[in-house]
Amino acid sequence: MFPKEIILETTNFCNLRCKFCHFHGINAPHKRKKGYMKPHIWERVLAELNSISKNHTSHNNHDITLCFHGAGEPLLHPELRQMLLSARVIEGLSIGFMTNGMLLSMEWAEFLIDLPLDWLSLSIDTANEAINNSIRVGSDLMTVSDNVKRLIELKARKGSELPRLHFNMVAYPQVSERDISEYVMNWIDGACNITVSRFRPVSSKRLIEYIDEGVRDRVSLRPCPLLYRQMVIGWDGRVGLCCEDIFIDECIGNVLTESIEDIFNGEPIMRIRRLHQEGRKEDVPLCRECDVWAGDIVIREEDIVLGDRVVRKKEMVWADVYEG
């Protein structure tokens, strides 16, 4: 078994100090050293992925999604361009990363389109400048919007569908339904999809309590799907249990001493999978108060009218997803 999604944390440094960030926020526990991934780590990972690709007898395009992000801002890493160039030549990879958009310069826009990058996930909270700038400390909504619009315009001029753009915002308590509608209308034309995530207080991994009680009763406990499809490699090579293990409290291996395949099939993660299968996720400290196992469950789907257009809205446990 091999992961379908690999998160390669280029760095956990960030240029923002968002108030509700689970890693960089003022009230977040600071339990992990910050750093930048060194070449001998990411080159080792890419070499294994290249070997897997060449030995794959029934190869399909984009078998593995490779994400160049983590608890920080990828565009801060001085070697990100080389990482992406090295990954691009490996068959079977869908490559992309999440960014807050502040450093998305014209030069970066040109590079990402020409590479081409498969997808880019843009973390922009609300279309309300005052709310955005007060919550996302260090961000400026006008700068981010200009950067993203320039990327969209450049894609059009070059006639490129790539990178596909995914927009992500958090429905903070300060954000109204009108703000959400305005956000969706603002970006839907350039988006592959738009995700409005449920607000979770710092350190909380709870999701189910925020959905309607009637729906909540229909969500049955199951093994977390992330355990079977995702691997998160920290900037220092240590492997966390999943994307919710932002401090690598549940380290299941190290890519400097083990292969991705061995880690993904090793006893540390197999033990946790067994506990989930037995309905004993509470025996895993990281999983005890976590509802992310239910995150991809669809509650309902409907077409809604926003402005002068119809948009498909998919309500999920962890977020509302809009598609044009």
Image (cartoon, grey):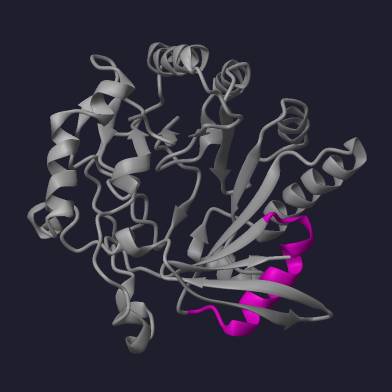
Asked if residue 123 lies left or right of residue 206, the reply is right
Left or right: 152 in relation to 301 = right
Q: Residue drawn 39% across and 11% down?
A: 40
Task: Tell me residue 319's x, y (percent).
Answer: 48, 68
Whether 180 is among the magenta residues is: yes
Q: Residue at x 52, y 32 (%)?
A: 63
Residue 6 screen position, x and y as percent? 42, 34
Secondary structure mostly seen in magenta is: helix
Frontmost residue, 14 versus 99: 99
Q: Is residue 139 above or below residue 212?
A: above
Q: Nearer the viewer, residue 248 or 297?
A: 297
Which corner quadrant holds the C terminus? Answer: bottom right
Residue most toward the right? 157
Q: For this rendering, which residue is in front, 110 or 77?
A: 110
Span of residues in magenta? 174-192
Residue 240 lies, with reference to residue 253, above or below; the image says below
- Image quadrant for the N terminus? top left
Residue 187 drawn above or below residue 176? above
Locate residue 16, reporting x and y percent. Answer: 49, 49
In this orientation, does residue 314 appear? yes
Please tell me whether residue 175 belongs to the stretch shown in magenta.
Answer: yes
Farthest residue to the left: give it: 283
Q: Is residue 317 left or right of residue 113?
A: left
